[in-house]
Image (cartoon, grey):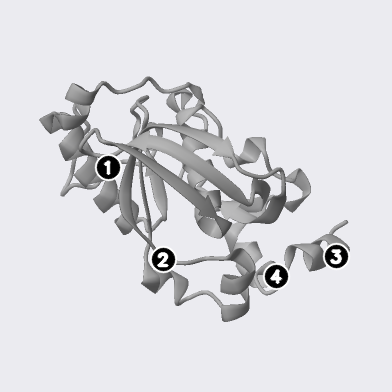
Amino acid sequence: MKPKMSSMKLKIWQAGEAVLRRKSRLLMPEEILGGEIQDLIAAMRDTMRDAPGVGLAAPQVGLDIQLAVIEDRPEYIQKVPPAQIEDRQRRPVPFHVLVNPTLTLETQETVEFFEGCLSVAGFTAIVPRASRVRVEYLDERAQPRSIVAEGWYARILQHEIDHLNGKLYIDRMDTRSFGTVENYTRYWKDYSVPEFRKLVP
């Protein structure tokens, strides 16, 4: 299962690859602690930061295993207007590893925001997500952990766990909102989702 590494950077696979549409297999504790998975975690971390992104799942680098890395760095958030930070309930999230995660919705309330994906490069769309979730998982030391998250962190978790189940955000998106990141930045980045819907009903 050795990934092809170049300076610890991995190729990010794009929509259309079969691995992105398969449910990934569980990892055994001894696999998690083994050298291959530990090297993979480091490579995925470096690849995510290089992209840059706030999450990366193993299927996105061609491996159908239940492993994802997440990090929302303070410097990413500093680039977002304060009103959007508050609206999205976005706070820094330290680097961590999810193995074999199970997700439970803590509320039926959903929130809508534009969302992108490193495996659907260059595009974005409005995606409804639960506003609060619980995730049970193993960490990189194969120790059981639990997270209750809300706001943008809850969205990141749902997005990455979708990858482990063969789903992309395009399966959940409002299709009329789908467009290039370039045009989103040009026309829509300063509009809220309700304002966008008034202009593009």
Question: Which residue is label 2 attached to?
Answer: 92
Question: Which residue is label 1 attached to?
Answer: 10
2 and 1 marks in contact (CB < 8 Å) = no
Question: Which residue: 49% across, 48% down?
Answer: 148
Question: Which residue: 80% across, 68% down?
Answer: 195
4 and 3 marks in contact (CB < 8 Å) = no
Real-space CA distance between mark 1 and mark 4, rounded to the nearest whole angstrom = 32 Å
Q: What label sits on residue 181 in the rendered view?
A: none
What secondary structure is marked by label 4?
helix
- The answer to whether 123 appears left or right of 147 in the picture is right
Give the residue type that dot 3 points to: Leu
What secondary structure is marked by label 3?
helix
Which quadrant holds residue 198? bottom right
Crowd around label 1: few <14 · some 14–19 · many ≥20 (10 Å)? many
Q: Position of residue 183 (x, y in %)?
A: 65, 63
Question: Which residue is label 3 attached to?
Answer: 199
Q: In the rendered structure, which disc, 1 or 4, sits on the residue that comes first in sequence?
A: 1
